[in-house]
Amino acid sequence: DDLETLRRIADRLRKWPQARLGLLAASRQPDLLLGAMPYVDGLVIDLDPTLDLRVIVTLANGPYPEVALILQASVDDSRDLRGPVRRLLDAATAWPDANLVLALQAPERDLIHAYRRLAVECAQRTVDAPILLRVQAPDDPLLPASIALGSLLCDGLGDAVVIDGLADSSG
């Protein structure tokens, strides 16, 4: 059961308060989001999937702002990583007073380089926004996603992690 798994993860995170980790739930099923509320620090709600805009709503005293807008750019061509990153940062600078979270969607082969490019561009343009590391999980195993996330986290990049595409056991 998805909610039971979520409860176990939340219980484990509470054992390490010094880690200052927050647990967010995201689902396209409203009943699953409602059931997750007692166990998580916040919900991720799609505003417009076609524009890659999402909102994070904090439910408790988690490490996230009360409301944050997730801006995400998609990297389609590994030869042009700067274009999507620059468009993402242009959008971020258009909302200077908003609580923004930045994310990229990129093929596995380009993921590490794309996020490193995002970090460099953020530093050059003095954009101070949390970076959400998003990876696409293959059916099995999770090894490629783990390598990408581990590399970026070891670089000191990323404030939160999302693994998309895990099998949904709810049918």
Image (cartoon, helix red, strand yellow):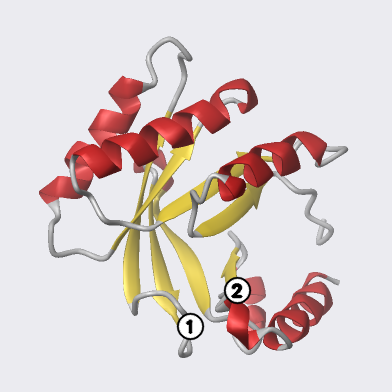
Amino acid under label 1? Gly
The residue closer to the viewer here, 83 or 16, is: 16
Q: Is residue 62 left or right of residue 29?
A: left
Instruction: State which quarter of the image contains the N terminus.
Output: bottom right
Q: Earlier in the sequence, mark 2 or mark 1?
A: 2
Circles 2 and 1, Cβ within 8 Å, touching? The answer is yes
Q: Is residue 90 left or right of residue 79?
A: left
109 and 69: which is toward the camera? 109
* Residue 62, numbered circle: 1
Residue at horizontal 50%, vertical 77%?
Answer: 42
Q: Is residue 142 left or right of residue 121?
A: right
Q: Residue at x 83, y 79 (%)?
A: 4
Residue 135 appears in the rendering = yes
The reply to whether residue 34 is in sight is no
- Residue 78 horizontal side relative to residue 65, left or right: right
In this rendering, is residue 164 above or below 38? above
Q: Position of residue 34 (x, y in %)?
A: 60, 81
Q: Quadrant of residue 151?
A: top right
User: Residue 32: horizontal and vertical position, in percent?
Assistant: 66, 73
Q: CA distance from mark 2 to mark 1?
A: 8 Å
Q: Residue at x 35, y 76 (%)?
A: 65
Q: Amino acid at mark 2?
A: Leu
Please determine whether, in this image, residue 169 is positioned above or below residue 36: above
Q: Which mark is residue 23?
A: 2
Residue at image location 46% in from the left, 29% down from the top: 114
Nearer the observer, 127 or 7: 127
Q: Secondary structure at mark 1?
A: loop
Residue 9: x percent and y percent?
A: 76, 76
